[in-house]
């Protein structure tokens, strides 16, 4: 009975197989439609043409990115009669808001990986990018800068090699610094470093010591001179000093001069009377003799006073008195 049950034909086998095949085909079609939808096949797009001198590294299906997000996809690459490469890009309508008339497009190629298309928009308030717009592409190829970079690096290495050579200025400067440090650590320290040798520093220290001794001697001499001046002040201006005696002598001189002036006035009067009384010659002669004796006495007093003054103080004066 078991063999009879399994040996019986399944009813509607062809119909079930066709249904299963249709289901599989439907799933494949749904998956394909989903993939096409996910890739934006059915999405409304706007065409953009980018002109580049070289499209090396750019492939169909590559993305056009803005701030790191894809906003377009390369559909094909064409060579135009001018010798440039034209990159055809489809941009979804929902992403066209990021592209403006002032947008800049770059083609960057790194050392590793393929080229990357980027869009930069400085002013999002600018006018929108029109459909079928043609824009140039600025290249930012890193490999193009490698020769200049290598040349600059080689120049830097040459400079470093020259700086580290035995006869380089850097080594000469380090040797000078070492010599300066050795001088600073010497006997006279900074003086040796400034003057160049210990002998010169020793001379300077000796000169300073001599100057100190001379200053001490001058200071002692100044004290002595001060005491001498104080003594001279006391001798000149104290009570009983030269100036006091001089003042007394001047007072006596003034008194003597007063006596001489009075005697001279008397002589003038007598001479006037002598002229009036010419007849009485003997009387006039006697008066003139007495007057002359008085004048000579006054002059002797004056001469003695002047000699006294000269003894007390060295006055340089003409003491000659002329008689009338």
Image (tube, grey):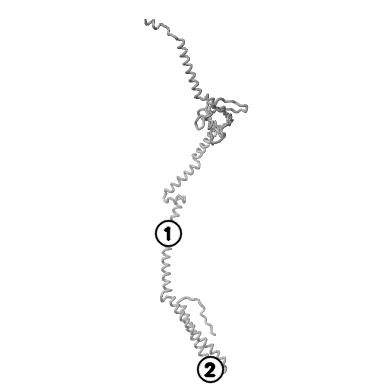
The quarter in which the C terminus is drawn is bottom right
Mark 1, Cα crowd under 10 Å, few <14 / some 14-19 / many 20+, is few
Quadrant in which residue 4 is drawn:
top left
In the rendered image of this protein, does residue 5 appear above or below residue 183? above
Task: Decide which of 155, 204 is in the foreground and name it.
Answer: 155
Identify the residue at the far right of this view.
81
What residue does disc 2 label?
Answer: 283
Dot label at residue 26:
none
Local SS, label 1: helix
Q: Residue at x 51, y 37 (%)?
A: 156
Quadrant in which residue 225 is drawn:
bottom left
In the rendered image of this protein, does residue 182 appear above or below residue 23? below
178 sits to left or right of 137: left
Local SS, label 2: helix
Q: How many labels were placed on the picture?
A: 2
Mark 2, Cα crowd under 10 Å, few <14 / some 14-19 / many 20+, is few
Dot label at residue 212:
1
Residue 119 location (% of width, % of height):
53, 32
Q: Residue at x 43, y 74 (%)?
A: 237
Task: Decide which of 264, 86 is in the foreground and name it.
Answer: 86
Identify the residue at the far left of this view.
1
- Residue 51 showing in the rendered view: no
In the rendered image of this protein, does residue 214 appear above or below residue 54? below
Rounded to the nearest whole Å, what is the CA distance between mark 1 and mark 2? 86 Å
Task: Decide which of 194, 272 is in the foreground and name it.
Answer: 272
Residue 147 location (% of width, % of height):
54, 33
């Amino acid at each position: 009975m078991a063999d009879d049950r399994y040996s019986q034909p399944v009813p509607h086998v062809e119909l079930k197989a066709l249904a299963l095949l249709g289901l599989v085909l439907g799933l494949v079609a749904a998956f394909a439609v989903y993939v096409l939808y996910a890739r934006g096949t059915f999405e409304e797009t706007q065409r953009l043409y980018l002109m580049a001198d070289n499209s090396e590294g750019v492939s169909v299906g590559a993305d056009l990115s803005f701030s790191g997000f894809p906003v377009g996809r390369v559909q094909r690459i064409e060579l135009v009669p001018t010798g440039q490469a034209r990159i055809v890009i489809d941009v979804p309508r929902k992403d066209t808001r990021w592209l403006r008339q002032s947008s800049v497009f770059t083609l960057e190629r790194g050392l590793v990986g393929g080229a990357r298309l980027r869009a930069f928009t400085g002013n999002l308030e600018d006018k929108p990018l029109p459909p079928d717009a043609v824009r140039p592409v600025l290249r930012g190829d890193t490999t193009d800068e490698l020769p200049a970079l290598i040349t600059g690096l080689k120049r830097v290495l040459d400079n470093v090699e020259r700086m580290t050579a035995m006869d380089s200025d850097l080594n000469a400067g380090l040797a000078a610094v070492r010599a300066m440090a050795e001088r600073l650590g010497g006997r006279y320290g900074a003086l040796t470093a400034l003057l160049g040798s210990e002998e010169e520093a020793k001379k300077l220290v000796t000169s300073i010591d001599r100057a100190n001794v001379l200053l001490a001697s001058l200071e002692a001499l100044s004290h002595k001179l001060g005491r001498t001046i104080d003594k001279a002040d006391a001798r000149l201006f104290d009570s009983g000093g030269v100036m006091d005696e001089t003042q007394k002598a001047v007072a006596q001189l003034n008194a003597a001069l007063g006596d001489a002036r009075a005697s001279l006035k008397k002589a003038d009067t007598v001479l006037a009377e002598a002229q009036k009384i010419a007849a009485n010659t003997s009387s006039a002669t006697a008066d003139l003799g007495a007057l002359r004796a008085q004048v000579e006495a006054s002059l002797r007093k004056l001469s003695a006073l002047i000699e006294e003054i000269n003894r007390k103080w060295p006055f340089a004066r003409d003491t000659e008195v002329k008689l009338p």
